[in-house]
Structure formats: structure tokens, C-alpha cells
């Protein structure tokens, strides 16, 4: 129970269905717990209040060490290498469905439940991860690295509900957080300015912003602070020769410490019909039939895009899309779908 409305309604629904429910509040970050951007103290108060209303016990557990070792260290390594990782995906596979799951089993639990918008289906003894009924809230993208053992112990009671229904249920049952705003951003960064946060952990080495043909158009503050497709915060003026269109980050020259920028959302440098992926993970435990067409997302807020997958070695593959994809970003995840079924995914290596 995070203190948010989704996990609160999850606990309520399970209690109504007759399960013996124990709430668990996870503390995963404590470096600056007293800062204006860290809401964990209020979140715990909200979670305890809801547990009291529902009539279930709740305990708090600290996974800050596990989080730092398994998630945050990876996050920093990736940014330092010029890639853009997705720590929320790793948090699910390493903390919520590993550290938390192990803790729950030690307590004697049969299963764990979370407020994710997704569904699990068992077919012939194998567990499938499905999209949520509310397509606008579907979170299967963030769960694609779960395995059979983890999915077999997971419950997602909100999978068939719309977000509006979840808030209605919370309001009807007088849960104190029924109108609480959804959390946004990376879990340990929250609402704080991202560049300011990253600057505390990584050195900044300024350099040139250049066009693909090498023309210098500005200065960057350090390659780690930018991501492919970024438009805000570049600080490049129009100039006499400018087309007037906005500038976007199109690439990074790590060796030369140069940030490559282009003008126009649909500039060819931002579009790619191919990508290579590594560390491929299949939820079923074995590779799907890659001779057939699938769909994939290269970022969370994106429609499924038709593609073909060619494995080139054990956990590597090349994706070819029917339509070129915008701002394919190394370090992000490409997640594979067969209709409503999430098959797995990998880490984007490059075009």
C-alpha cells in the first residue's frame, strides 16, 4: 500500500472478496527524506488511515538498501553511459516482485497484490500478462520483466476497472485518499527538478550542441542530462538561418562530448524503422514464434506498432517496424505484444 488510491482500493476489494489482507508500506528511498519533494511520510499516514478504515493490519518495511543496490546504481550507470534507463521497470522486477514478494512469503502470504492496471491469466499451467481493461491506464509495459514464478504469485484486482471507477469506489467507502493526486515521475525523484537531482550524483561536462553536419548551435550542460526526443531545456535561439521550428535532441556523440540536435518534430534523424535490443526477456520463459508479426512499444505512452523480430543471439534481437518509430532511445525498453498479451521485451541498444 503506497498511500495512493489504486493500492488502497486494491486492498479494499480483496477484503470484500473474503481474503485475509495485510497491508505493506514500502520505503525505498531515504537519502533526502525530509526534502520538500519527498512525500513518503505523508504517504505512510495515508496508507495507515486507509488500512484503519478498511479494517486490516499494516506494516512498514524498509527496502532502501535493496533499492540502492539493485535499481539506483543501475540508473546512475546508464545515465553516465549516455543512455536513458527506466528504473520503474527494474523496481517492479527487483523490488516489488522480488524483495517485497520474498518478504510477503516469509510472513506466510499466498500471494501479493498491487494497484497496477494489468491482468494475469493462467493457461495450461502457464501465466500470461495481459493489458488492463482501461487502455489509457494499462501498465503492462512496466511489468514486462516479470517471470512465471512472480506472475503466479501476483494479483491485480484493478485490471478490469476504469480509473474513474476506482476513484468512485474509494469515495463510496470514504477512503481518505479518494481524491489524492496520482504520483508522477520516477519513484525516487518524484516532483523535484530532474537535472538538479542528477547533478548531485554525476559529474557534468559541458560541450557543444551540433547539427548532424557538425554546425555548432549551442552548449549543453553534460550529455547525461539529455534524452533522445527532448525538446524542453535546450536553450537554442532561432538564429537568422533558422526555420523557426523547435529543436530536438537526436543523438549523442559520447566520444566527442557533443549533443546532436535537429529542427522539426519529424526530422529524419528522429525516425527509425529499426532498432536492436539486448537483455531480451520472455514472460513465458522461452522465445515466442518470431516468424509471425507482433506489435511493440518503444515508450510507455505510445500505440502498439506492428513489427517483426529477428533474434540474432540468445538475448539479442533486431526489430523492424512497418512504420518508422519516433525518438528511439537507447536504455529505454521495447515491449512486445500479441494482441492483449504482453510477451516480454528488452533494452533498446540502438537503431
Image (cartoon, grey):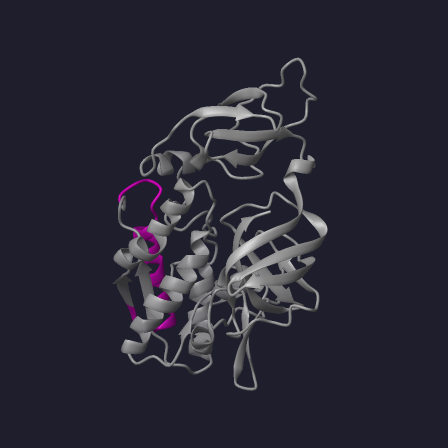
The part of the image, by quadrant, that contains residue 103 is bottom left
Q: Residue at x 35, y 71 (%)?
A: 101
Q: Is residue 191 visible?
A: no
**Does the stretch in magenta take in 57?**
yes
Q: Residue at x 63, y 59 (%)?
A: 296
Q: Nearer the viewer, residue 56 or 291?
A: 291
Residue 203 image position (x, y, % from top left): 34, 33
Q: Is residue 35 visible?
A: yes
Residue 114 image position (x, y, % from top left): 44, 67
84 left or right of 24 in image: right
255 shown above or below 86? above
Residue 77 image position (x, y, % from top left): 37, 46
Q: Residue furthest bottom?
A: 124
Q: Residue at x 39, y 39 (%)?
A: 192
213 left or right of 173 in image: right
242 left or right of 256 in image: right
Total numbered badges shown on the rendered structure:
0
Magenta residue span:
34-58
113 left or right of 267 in image: left
23 shown above or below 71? below
Amino acid at each position: 500500500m503506497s498511500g495512493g488510491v489504486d493500492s488502497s482500493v486494491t486492498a479494499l476489494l480483496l477484503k470484500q472478496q473474503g481474503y485475509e489482507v495485510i497491508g505493506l508500506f514500502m520505503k525505498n528511498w531515504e537519502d533526502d527524506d525530509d526534502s520538500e519533494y519527498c512525500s513518503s511520510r505523508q504517504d505512510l499516514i495515508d496508507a495507515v488511515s486507509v488500512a484503519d478504515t478498511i479494517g486490516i493490519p499494516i506494516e512498514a518495511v524498509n527496502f532502501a538498501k535493496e533499492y540502492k543496490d539493485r535499481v539506483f546504481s543501475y540508473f546512475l550507470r546508464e545515465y553516465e553511459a549516455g543512455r536513458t534507463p527506466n528504473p520503474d521497470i527494474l523496481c517492479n522486477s527487483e523490488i516489488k516482485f522480488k524483495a517485497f514478494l520474498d518478504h510477503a512469503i516469509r510472513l506466510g502470504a499466498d500471494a501479493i497484490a498491487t494497484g497496477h492496471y494489468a491482468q494475469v491469466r493462467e493457461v495450461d499451467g502457464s501465466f500470461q500478462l495481459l493489458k488492463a481493461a482501461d487502455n489509457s491506464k494499462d501498465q503492462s509495459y512496466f511489468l514486462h520483466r516479470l517471470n512465471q514464478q512472480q506472475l503466479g504469485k501476483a494479483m491485480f484486482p484493478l485490471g478490469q476497472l476504469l480509473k474513474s471507477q476506482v476513484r468512485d469506489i474509494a469515495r463510496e467507502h470514504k477512503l481518505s485518499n479518494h481524491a489524492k493526486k496520482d504520483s508522477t515521475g520516477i519513484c525516487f525523484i518524484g516532483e523535484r527538478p530532474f537535472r538538479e537531482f542528477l547533478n548531485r550524483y554525476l559529474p557534468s561536462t559541458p560541450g557543444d550542441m551540433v547539427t548532424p553536419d557538425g554546425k555548432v548551435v549551442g552548449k549543453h550542460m553534460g550529455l547525461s542530462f539529455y534524452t533522445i526526443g527532448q525538446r524542453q531545456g535546450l536553450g537554442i535561439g532561432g538564429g537568422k538561418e533558422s526555420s523557426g521550428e523547435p529543436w530536438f535532441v537526436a543523438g549523442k556523440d559520447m566520444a566527442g562530448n557533443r549533443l546532436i540536435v535537429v529542427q522539426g518534430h519529424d526530422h529524419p534523424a528522429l525516425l527509425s524503422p529499426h532498432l536492436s535490443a539486448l537483455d531480451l526477456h520472455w514472460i513465458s520463459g522461452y522465445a515466442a514464434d518470431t516468424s509471425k508479426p507482433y506489435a511493440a512499444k518503444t515508450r510507455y505512452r505510445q500505440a502498439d506498432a506492428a513489427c517483426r523480430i529477428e533474434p540474432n543471439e540468445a538475448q539479442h534481437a533486431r526489430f523492424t517496424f512497418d512504420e518508422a518509430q519516433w525518438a528511439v532511445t537507447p536504455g529505454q525498453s521495447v515491449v512486445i505484444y500479441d494482441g492483449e498479451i504482453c510477451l516480454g521485451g528488452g533494452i533498446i541498444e540502438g537503431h
